Image (cartoon, helix red, strand yellow):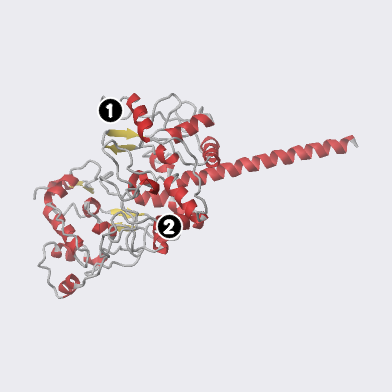
Amino acid sequence: MIKSLTALLLGTLSFAALAEDTAADALVQRGEYLARAGDCVACHSTAGGKPFAGGLAMATPIGTIYSTNITPDKATGIGDYSYDDFQKAVRHGVAKNGDTLYPAMPYPSYAVVSDDDMKALYAYFMHGVAPVAQANKESDIPWPLSMRWPLAIWRGLFAPDVKAFQPAAQEDPALARGRYLVEGLGHCGACHTPRSITMQEKALNNGQGNDYLAGSSAPIDGWTASNLRGDNRDGLGRWSEADLQQFLRYGRNDHTAAFGGMTEVVQHSLQYLSDADISAIARYLKSLGAKDPSQAVFREDDAVARALWKGDDSQPGAGVYVDSCAACHKTDGSGYQRFYPALRGNPVVMAEDPTSLIHIVLVGGTLPGVKGAPTAITMPAFGWRLNDSQVADVVNFIRSSWGNGVQTKVTAKQVAKLRQDDSVQLKQGSADIRVLEKQ
């Protein structure tokens, strides 16, 4: 009888321990998913590919900031952070030693992350990430901007009090989920919302105004972040929810393809999200009104296509387009569906700021293959053989053709300035393409 009771007790204890281990594993797995949703690896990985070990250089208006080691290494990472230390850093932007973090760490967005999700993230970073002993680099920011104490004042003025996300009364659950992901872990506003002169986002959510997600106010690493609101020309007004789901999941759809930093968001984050979460994000973004409701709807115009078909390339930039662009994007600017993006009616092409279009003509880019769309899309660089005037002409041709109707002219001087930007990698093999800037 005693043996039976002992066996029963041991079995019960073993079952309880197993259940506890299973619950802990599930929490870590949940945290891994959330870390992907937040794309933490994009900033906190090393150039050599060590996940979360930090050291990635980020150019900002005040200097270069290096991301920190957030592995559980006790000497150089966050291994000695308690849960409270962790959530204060993520939500408030306050490190364990009391220093205020630079807002390159988007803690204003992370303020809305729920307690349950924050605990799952902590479990993942403490128990699901391999510790890496790698010292943090000092940021390359000149004095007095390098002083930390003014950041505490900035945080007090512009970072909100921590308030976990709450759905609105009778809010569609899918819409609420999408709002939570976009405003919180996805921190989409960090790039896609314009900033004030004091560097805070002009709005942290749609309730604070239609600046929210209306596109970056200045280039970031040589790229401009697109308008994610419902504007007809430079936003998502002509996209359906299905179009947006396609873009979020694969980085490409019938209207455009991802470029710049967005390619990494798709590669490291969005392709791993559940169908339900992708659908929720798309639904929320499609619920946003236009920043500029007066924008005219894009209307296709085939005059340029007919001229090129007849061999008339007399318009400035037309000859360069035929020689360098038409093979992939076609003479009518329609491209090849979900492979070489259309240029006619493309929101990026019709955006007020031409920086991204100039950038990709100069240096090209690659959208890596992802789950469900394994073929990479590569745009070759043309800056090595086109001079500043030629680049300006072809960009103007693209922006004014097929109904795009952009009248603001790009100048050779603008191209030259971007060509000199340190954030734009202007190399073709071993030849520095800056040799063409004055030709």
- Looking at the image, which is closer to me, 400 or 151? 151
Does dot 2 land on a helix, a strand or a loop? helix
Q: Specify the quadrant that holds the N terminus.
A: top right
The residue under label 2 is which amino acid type? Ala
Looking at the picture, how far across and down is residue 147, in whole percent? 31, 24
Q: Give the labeled residue for mark 1.
A: 145
Q: Which label's residue is closer to the chain start, 1 or 2?
A: 1
- Looking at the image, which is closer to me, 111 or 244? 111
Looking at the picture, how far across and down is residue 238, in whole percent? 33, 64
Q: Are marks 1 and 2 in contact (CB under 8 Å)?
A: no
Q: Residue at x 17, y 70 (%)?
A: 304
The residue under label 1 is which amino acid type? Leu
Does dot 1 land on a helix, a strand or a loop? loop
Q: Residue at x 19, y 65 (%)?
A: 401
**Residues under labels 1 and 2: Cα distance?**
38 Å
Q: Give the labeled residue for mark 2.
A: 282
Q: Which mark is residue 347?
A: none
